[in-house]
Amino acid sequence: MVVTGGADGIGAALCRRFAREGARVIVVADRNGEGARAVAGEIGGEAATVDVSDGAAVAALVADVEARHGGIDLFCSNAGVGGGDPDRRNAASSPDDAWARAWGVNVMAHVYAARAAIPGMQARGGGYLLNTISAAGLLSQIGGAVYSTTKHAAVGFAESLAITHGDQGIKVSILCPQGVDTAMLRQGDAKSQPQNLDGVLSPDEVAESVVQGLAAENFLILPHPVVLTYMQRKAADYDRWLGGMRRLRGKMLGA
């Protein structure tokens, strides 16, 4: 199996949890090569230095792993980037380079992984794609238009994967947590981040949810189960949900 963004946070926790499950080969891939090597050394895996926003690099990674190990049973496209609106009063305030960076990592990395891994999975009669997204892709992210928009796009692509390839034996799951104790969360003031209101989970707790979700072959893996309730409320009355989000924004951001 391959885990991108495996040097720390959720990715590292997934690697450790899969190792305890007895995974035969775990390739820890990350732009941070030193961190990837540290995690790989800890679990007896392999490390790869990869920028997931580079399609050619992702294709080379998949080709190398397939050539040496005969295939990839599970590809965890886990890397992601965050960031908030520079001007909290303007949802369009992020510069173009912030949009491009988030699009490359939060969306295109999933596309590159699927593009590279699916042919081999089809030839072998099946495989599994796990895409780490966020509850922001199902709901929204107050004060983070770039993050929320790219995560919504990632959900849409994963749905297309499941619809197109589900009958080919290729399973797809998306991991959509709220607050998780990672470097991304610690970049800002945790008290002003609404995704933390329902509790901040450890990466290990999230990894446990993943193992359970993959075993059940659930498309939607929600470490914070309350997200499902929020989704239902959103679908039931969109305007009311938007009003509630505006009130929450005012409470959390004071604006």
Image: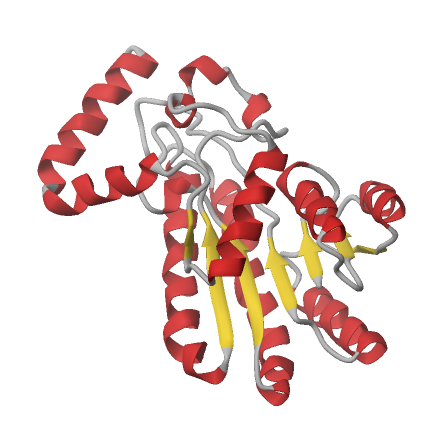
Residue extending farthest top: 254
Residue 125 spot, x, y in % from top left: 58, 86
Image point 71% across, 47% down: which residue? Answer: 6
Residue 63 spot, x, y in % from top left: 75, 76
- Residue 143 vs residue 155, the one in the foreground: 155
- Residue 114 vs residue 162, the one in the foreground: 162
- Residue 86 vs residue 178, the one in the foreground: 178
- Residue 107 visible in this rendered orientation of the protein: no
For the N terminus, give its image quadrant.
Answer: bottom right
Residue 253 spot, x, y in % from top left: 33, 15
- Total numbered badges shown on the rendered structure: 0
- Residue 132 vs residue 251, the one in the foreground: 132
Q: Quadrant of residue 240?
A: top left
Residue 53 spot, x, y in % from top left: 62, 56
For the C terminus, give its image quadrant.
Answer: top left
Location of residue 212 with respect to 60 vertically, above or below: above
Image point 25% across, 43% down: which residue? Answer: 231
The reply, left or right, for residue 88 in relation to residue 14 is left
Location of residue 126 with respect to 25 vertically, above or below: below
Image point 36% across, 60% down: which residue? Answer: 156
Colour scheme in use: secondary structure
- Residue 113 visible in this rendered orientation of the protein: yes
The reply, left or right, for residue 163 in relation to residue 62 is left
Location of residue 85 with respect to 154 vertically, above or below: above
